[in-house]
Image: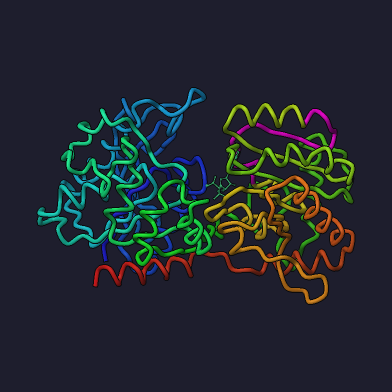
Amino acid sequence: MKVAMVVSEMEPFAKTGGLADVAGALPKALGSLGVDMHVFLPRYLCVKETRTGVEAGRGVTVHFIDHPGFFHRPALYGDSNGDYPDNLDRFSFFCREVFVQMNSLGIRPDLLHAHDWQSALSIVYLANRFREDPHFSRTASVFTIHNLAYQGLFPKDQFPRLDLPWSLFAIHGLEYYDRINLLKGGLIFARALTTVSPTYAREIQTREQGEGLEGVLQMRSRDLNGVLNGIDQEAWNPASDRLIPAPFDFKRLDPKEKNKEALQKEMGLPMDPKAFLIGMVTRLASQKGLDLVVEAIPRLAPLGIQLVILGSGDRAIEEALSRSAKSSKMIRLRLAFDNALAHRIYAGSDAFLMPSRYEPCGLGQMIAMRYGTIPIVRKTGGLNDTVKEEHPVEERGNGFCFEPASPEAIVEAVTRALALYRNPPKWRQLQRQVMGADFSWDRSAQEYLRLYEKLVG
Ligand code: ADP
């Protein structure tokens, strides 16, 4: 089976968030199951690879779509002033050019798999412009929602630039309250839809979390599957991680302490081995619940915890965090996107906090567990599917969960975690347990493959 994957970011070439991790790992996992994977990615300025196409593991070829005017910019989607104003032109070019390249390379995919609003037009073009094209008339399609909140909304007057008939600017097309909604195009025209966790698949069909598209998603409910993401267990492996000071594994956990000490030193925290060190690595977006952390900080600080936050994004959130970090010596903030520091935080922290208001899947909690770092999460989306409250007696569960989106709920969950941390044998046992969990891509890739096979027939 030949699959064209259209995606706007991919490890190790270009990354703003979890989508890049997925696009970096899923094709490899499918490639090793025998699928002939062709991934299409814009050639951004940050892409160091100079060839037009490269092998990225067994069965995976990555093709770069070039357009210096559109893609040779400091960032992928926008800068501190907001989204780039020509994003519709940039990503519609990208999606059209995928077909041009497939034609010139003789790639006739059995299936096209696109992700999020940036790639949604490839599905729309496939269904509307290439239905009669002998190269693509039999190509099935899958569209994956990684985050429903980002929809690619543009003013109606830009519609002609998409090179699609006006008849598609309609309720059963790309129209959304008199604007263009690219994500909606993917939801309507793909043969099958997936999203990145079973809980999120249910949540997005509700009014509360449907972001205005719950009607479309309810309509397509039977074609919508929740497939949990995995993590790249090679990239995130405490036993062989070159980015951390002291490698460790679940049999030899002691060196984790060295990582904690090094992290405390690096961040300028008191080097107290008994301090309960909580890490966060996150985009600074309202989704991630950082306002709740800001409010919780005055109540967390007296508990004697240490908190390290690595984040980048929204400037208002940066400022709010900076102000509250100044209030306590126990809080250290690094405003950056820094993959190496992220590794050191996952490895050196005792616990990892994700108080997300919504979370389609979330990778941070799974990466943390791989490093024996216990997740403290809000029960939503993929966090709900991957973290279960630790049970003090029955020893099941793998972390600490809370439901209300409130600072009090964070403080309570941290207090429960801290109580267990004060019981070192039990904490150690929990660490071993979470490190043994399987978050590899193998299982999810099998699920995608089953779906592909069903569609291709
Ligand atoms: P999202 O895709 O919503 O950003 P996920 O939890 O699915 O959230 O994935 C986030 C990924 O991006 C993880 O690999 C995380 O380590 C990484 N990441 C997020 N923020 C940063 C940052 N400031 N520096 C380095 N890595 C980050």
The percent position of residue 149, horizontal first and vertical second, equals: 47, 44
Q: Is residue 56 left or right of residue 185?
A: right
The percent position of residue 44, horizontal first and vertical second, equals: 39, 34
- Decide: is 396 above or below 92: below
Tell which of 190 and 341 is nearer to you. Answer: 190
Q: Residue at x 65, y 29 (%)?
A: 318
Q: Which residues are magenta?
A: 325-342
Among the 4 quarters of the image, the one containing residue 392:
bottom right
Q: Is residue 9 left or right of residue 308?
A: left
Q: Residue at x 31, y 25 (%)?
A: 69
Tell which of 117 and 236 is nearer to you. Answer: 117
Q: Residue at x 47, y 60 (%)?
A: 201
The percent position of residue 264, horizontal first and vertical second, equals: 80, 41
Among the 4 quarters of the image, the one containing residue 427:
bottom right
Among the 4 quarters of the image, the one containing residue 41:
top left
Q: Quadrant of the C terminus?
A: bottom left
- Decide: is 24 above or below 249: above
The percent position of residue 101, horizontal first and vertical second, equals: 21, 44
Q: Residue at x 22, y 31 (%)?
A: 161
- Decide: is 86 above or below 190: above
- Decide: is 378 above or below 34: above
Quadrant for ligand 1?
top right
Q: Is residue 342 left or right of residue 417?
A: left
105 inside magenta stretch: no
Q: Quadrant of the N terminus?
A: bottom left
